[in-house]
């Protein structure tokens, strides 16, 4: 009987090892295909493909620096807007909310995470963008006087980097909140009880004891949200404006790498154009890998500091 179980265990272990091996293999296959497809563009334009401001299919001149900058700006701005809200939702639902309110709030957050990106994009296009153009952008540029800075100057189109960042912020809030909530719930009860024994209130115990204890896991959730923001395509493509070129203004239309590939892949009329889009996808792939590698390093560092 033990020999039979041992054989079944070996089969099970082998199946799991095979499944695990598929992940790096798939990653390598994707990287190879992107590199192979984008190599003609990289070979022709060199490093300028990532540093120049040029995207002209008619003249066969391609470069993705504005889209690369737009990808990073929209993702980081969305993260800055979403993280405080998501952490507030997580702390309240995990530590402070009454049971009935907690159940409803958790359900609402989980439902938001399940909404398709195209739905967020349509909401952004038909609700958020008109509201930004009519009310928010004039207030930022004129009423608050921020139009004197390069970050809020220029005409008010509606579709813009700011609109894309706001849509992304709404999209990643449930991901960060869900991960942070589960991490907070996993903190040992002894940590809370020790804080209560010292006279701390529930709020003080949550903010001063539970959140620092779970810092590494919370940071991992934040990085998960950043990964979602970097790779989101259709929602951003609908509201970002689709303008090639650099602009310091958040109110101006822009582009991201994912939106660029999605919008133009079906219209690529020649091999070099198609190769440039594959190279743009390869650049997005590389950015995502670098961000995730840095995130893993930071999560490990935060975890080591928390243990110390």
Image (cartoon, helix red, strand yellow):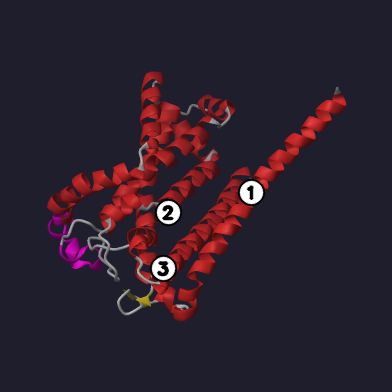
Q: Is residue 116 magenta?
A: no
Identify the residue position indicated by label 1 in the image: 22
Magenta region, main secondary structure = helix
Mark in front: 3 vs 1: 3
The x and y percentages for residue 31 are 55, 61
Front residue of 218 and 20: 20
Give the magenta part as a residue range.
138-155
Does label 2 or label 1 sit earlier along the sequence? 1
Front residue of 260 and 215: 260
* Residue at x 83%, y 30% (from the top left corner): 6
**Label 2 crowd (10 A; few <14 / some 14-19 / many >=20):** some
Q: Which mark is residue 39?
A: none
Identify the residue position indicated by label 2 in the image: 231
* Residue at x 52%, y 46% (from the top left corner): 220
Q: Name above or below for residue 23 compared with residue 190.
A: below
For label 3, the SS is helix
Give the left or right position of residue 209, taking residue 80 as reference: right
For label 2, the SS is helix
The x and y percentages for residue 203 are 42, 31
Does label 2 or label 3 sit earlier along the sequence? 2
Give the left or right position of residue 89, taking residue 160 as reference: right
**What is the distance, in whole Å, between disc 2 and disc 3 at their CAs?**
20 Å
Identify the residue position indicated by label 3 in the image: 274
The x and y percentages for residue 248 are 28, 68
Give the left or right position of residue 271, taking residue 29 as reference: left
């Amino acid at each position: 009987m033990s020999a039979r179980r041992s054989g079944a265990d070996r089969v099970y272990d082998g199946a799991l090892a095979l499944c695990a091996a598929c992940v790096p293999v798939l990653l390598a296959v994707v990287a190879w295909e992107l590199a192979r497809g984008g190599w003609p563009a990289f070979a022709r334009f060199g490093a300028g493909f990532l540093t120049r401001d040029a995207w002209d299919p008619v003249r066969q001149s391609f470069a993705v620096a504005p889209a690369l900058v737009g990808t990073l700006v929209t993702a980081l701005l969305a993260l800055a807007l979403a993280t405080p809200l998501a952490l507030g939702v997580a702390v309240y639902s995990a530590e402070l909310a009454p049971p009935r309110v907690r159940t409803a709030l958790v359900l609402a957050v989980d439902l938001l995470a399940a909404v398709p990106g195209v739905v967020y994009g349509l909401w952004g296009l038909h609700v958020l963008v008109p509201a930004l153009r009519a009310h928010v952008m004039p207030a930022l540029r004129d009423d608050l006087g921020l139009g004197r800075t390069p970050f809020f100057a220029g005409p008010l189109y509606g579709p813009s980097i700011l609109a894309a960042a706001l849509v992304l912020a709404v999209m990643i809030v449930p991901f960060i909140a869900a991960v942070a909530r589960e991490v907070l719930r996993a903190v040992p009860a002894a940590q809370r009880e020790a804080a209560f024994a010292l006279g701390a209130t529930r709020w003080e115990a949550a903010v001063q004891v539970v959140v620092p204890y779970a810092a590494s896991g919370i940071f991992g959730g934040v990085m998960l949200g950043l990964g979602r923001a970097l790779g989101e395509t259709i929602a951003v493509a609908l509201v970002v404006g689709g303008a090639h070129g650099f602009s310091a203004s958040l109110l101006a239309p822009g582009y991201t790498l994912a939106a660029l590939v999605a919008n133009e892949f079906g219209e690529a009329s020649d091999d070099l154009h198609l190769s440039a889009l594959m190279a743009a996808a390869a650049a997005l792939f590389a950015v995502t890998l670098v961000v995730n590698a840095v995130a893993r390093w930071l999560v490990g560092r935060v975890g080591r500091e928390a243990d110390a």
